[in-house]
Amino acid sequence: MPMKRILKTGWNCMEIAGVDGTGLLIDGKEYFRAFHHAASRARRHIVMTGWAFDSSVRLLRGGDALRANGHTKFLDFLDELCSRNPDLKVYILAWDFSVVFALDREWMQDLVFGSSRSGRIFFHFDANHPFGACQHEKFAVIDGQAAFVGGMDIASGRWDDRRHLISNPERTNPRGSPYNPYHDVQSYHSGQAAERLKEIFEELWSGATGSRIELAPVPPGADYLPEELGIPLPAAKVAISRTMARSVVNMRRPVREIRRLYTDAIKSAESLIYMENQYFSSYAVYRALIKRMRKRRRPRLQIVIILPLMTQTFIERISVGIAQARLLRRLRKVAKRRGHSFGIYYPIGLAAPGQKNEIPVFVHSKLMIVDDRFMTVGSANANNRSMGFDTELNIAWESGGGDGLSESIAGARLSLLAEHIGMDGLGDRSALENTGGLVAYLDSMAGRPFTRLRKRRMDPLSKIGGWLKWLGLDRVLIDPEHAVIDEYLAMLAPKASVFSRIKRWMARRLFP
């Protein structure tokens, strides 16, 4: 019996676009190198949007930098490209960030990027979103021919290679200070999808700046993507999904395609759900997992979730970590009661042989695989904000059967798990292919000497979160799913009685 299709245009994706080539880039070294290669071949325009940028971040490091012909620092590299090519223009759109993140950002970036020698690098802060939300999309497009979409910003603290060593002299920020191992996933695309992403950027730029840019089509002709790039996927099409909230300034209809993408994919799962994410605090994703696990007549699932050991800040531990721990604890209980296998893990960086040191790898990727036939990668976290509040962009692939894509998605999952375990391409991966006993195998590997996988414990602060939940502050503080204007409009719904509106409000907060 054929599997029911997950992707539905106009529901959980804005459209399904053709690709000439597509695949995954694992960790910053692969993405930064691929972007450098593609941008070096730009003829007319480079467009980028992200949560953060750093003008001095090094795109190439080690041997790659020694072999480079020209600048490798981000802004110097772009300026050099513009100086060599008078037809080239660069447009960069960055989130107009909150003062909370001021110490983590390069200051006065509009002046820094605007002072380029070529005068053809255009930088703008994007504040076209509801109050408290952020522009969180992370994608780049070169000439409408090649595009990159995922969780990675070209910013300080993002570069790492797949070894995730505790000590790596190349893993330093622009000031020369080292930082901890960092894991992320980006995707690459050429063909129609890249052209469509360019058009999406044009719309974002117009909304943020109030002025339109017309990026004329560029005929094919340049080898934008390098050979032997990342993990190729034999797909002819990819789906593009978004999150866009309503704001007081922009009363557009909210777009929650990514939310539906996650819940529809989880609903369809027959054997395996594999997730990597910076957070797990989305009530929509949580409810979808609970509902799927309670289906008595459906097959039992293997559910694997890779998370960072801790959130990055204390505020996040209080407002996101507490809710996250509570949801994960409930999922474990339901999985055990219903006969599903449920494992939560985090990877570590390893020291040199003979040393016992270990440092958690910070997991920043936003990836989900279902039954090795569906995969999505993008900017959206598995938290409430990404499902309805922030501006997000995801890409998804779905196998139609007999196209080789399912085998390639399985290969991508095996490659990621081998990285997290520390097999480095040398170990026997056959056990990872057996999805029927995947959680049991990962449990047996987690914590072994010289392996990099660990079982994730719950945050001790989660024990004090009951009163925050009762007050509805566990989501509202930093992780809301709806803009304030949406909450207000919902309360004014004409068909609902006052009692029913109050009941729905309490239910959302007390019984998610």
Image (tube, grey):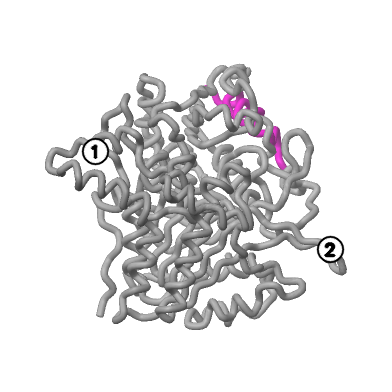
Q: Quadrant of the C terminus?
A: bottom left
Q: Position of residue 349 (x, y in %)?
A: 73, 60
Question: Within the magenta stretch, is there residue 76?
Answer: yes
Q: Residue furthest right?
A: 354
Considering the numbered disc 1 on the image, is that residue within a helix, a strand or a loop?
Answer: helix
The residue tagged 1 is 491
Magenta residues, start to end: 68-86
Find residue 136 and report its horizontal and vertical position in percent: 47, 39
- The picture places residue 227, in percent across and down from the top left corner, at 57, 55
Where is 448 relative to 125, above or below?
A: below
| Quarter placement of the N terminus | bottom left
Between 83 and 460, the residue placed more toward the observer is: 460
Q: Which residue is pictured at 52% across the width and 45% down the height?
A: 319
Query: SS for tag 2?
Result: loop
Q: Amino acid at mark 2?
A: Ala
| The label number, if any, that marks residue 475 in the structure image | none
Residue beneath label 2, please?
352
In the picture, measured across the screen, residue 174 lies left or right of residue 254, that is right
Q: In x, y percent, where is residue 263?
A: 34, 60
- Going 24% across and 38% down the picture, which residue do you hit? 491
Residue drawn at point x = 48 percent, y = 29 percent: 93
- From this viewpoint, is residue 189 visible? no
Label 1 Cα crowd, 10 Å radius (few <14 / some 14-19 / many 20+): some
Q: Find the distance from the CA under tag 1 to the CA under tag 2.
A: 59 Å
Which of the marked residues, 1 or 2, is nearer the chain's N terminus?
Answer: 2
- Magenta residue check for 498: no
Query: Which residue sits at x=58%, y=48%?
Result: 317
Disc 1 marks which amino acid? Met
- Which is nearer the eye, 84 or 47? 47
